[in-house]
Amino acid sequence: MKLKHNDCLNFSTIDATKGICRITKQLINIDSETCSNLALMPKCKNCKNFENPDEKGMGTCTGLEKEDWTFESLNAVTCKGHKFK
């Protein structure tokens, strides 16, 4: 799994392409290489309950009462079913 800056809890999004690192206060591009301060953000793609993603990143969540479709990029910070792989 290739990680981006927006996969980090220390990243604060400004727009679709850039954000600010909460640690260094530097402006950074989302697609640039991650640093050693990476704190993995809970997202569907790094949850053990996210299954069978297709080529577009759509998969099935099996961690809640009802199975449902979801995108791998969905933030799961408040998800009660999220469990890191």
Image (tube, rainbow, N blue to C red):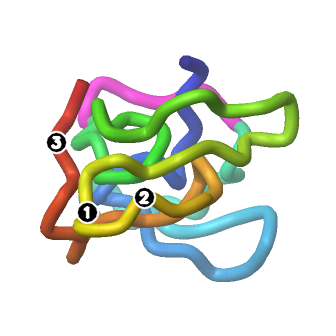
Name the image quarter holding the N terminus.
top right
Residue where numbered disc 3 is placed:
83
Percent of width and height locating residue 61: 43, 51
Q: Is residue 66 left or right of residue 54?
A: left
Q: Are marks 2 and 1 in contact (CB under 8 Å)?
A: yes
Query: Disc 2 marks which residue?
Result: 67
* In the image, residue 34 lies in the stretch drawn in magenta: yes
Give the total of numbered labels.
3
**Alpha carbon distance from label 3 to label 2:** 15 Å
Q: Position of residue 51 (x, y in %)?
A: 49, 32
Q: Residue at x 54, y 47 (%)?
A: 60
Residue at image position (56%, 75%) is: 13
- Work out how far the residue at label 2 is from the one at label 1, CA to CA, in angstroms: 6 Å
Inspect the image, locate mark 2, and give the three-letter code of the amino acid beneath it. Answer: Glu
Q: Is tag 3's residue or tag 2's residue first in the polypeptide sequence?
A: 2
**Magenta-drawn stretch contains 63:** no
- Quadrant, the C terminus: top left
Segment tinted magenta in the rendering: 32-37
Q: Which mark is residue 51?
A: none
Secondary structure beneath disc 1? loop
Q: Which numbered disc flags the more N-terminal residue, 3 or 1?
A: 1
Q: Position of residue 76 (x, y in %)?
A: 33, 64
Residue most extreme to the front: 66
Majority SS type along the magenta span:
loop
**In this picture, residue 17 sits left or right of residue 35:** right
Three-letter code for the amino acid on which mark 3 is drawn: Lys
> Marks 3 and 1: which is nearer the front?
1
Q: Check disc 1 and report the residue beneath it.
A: 64
> 44 or 63: nearer the eye?
63
In-front residue for pair 64/35: 64
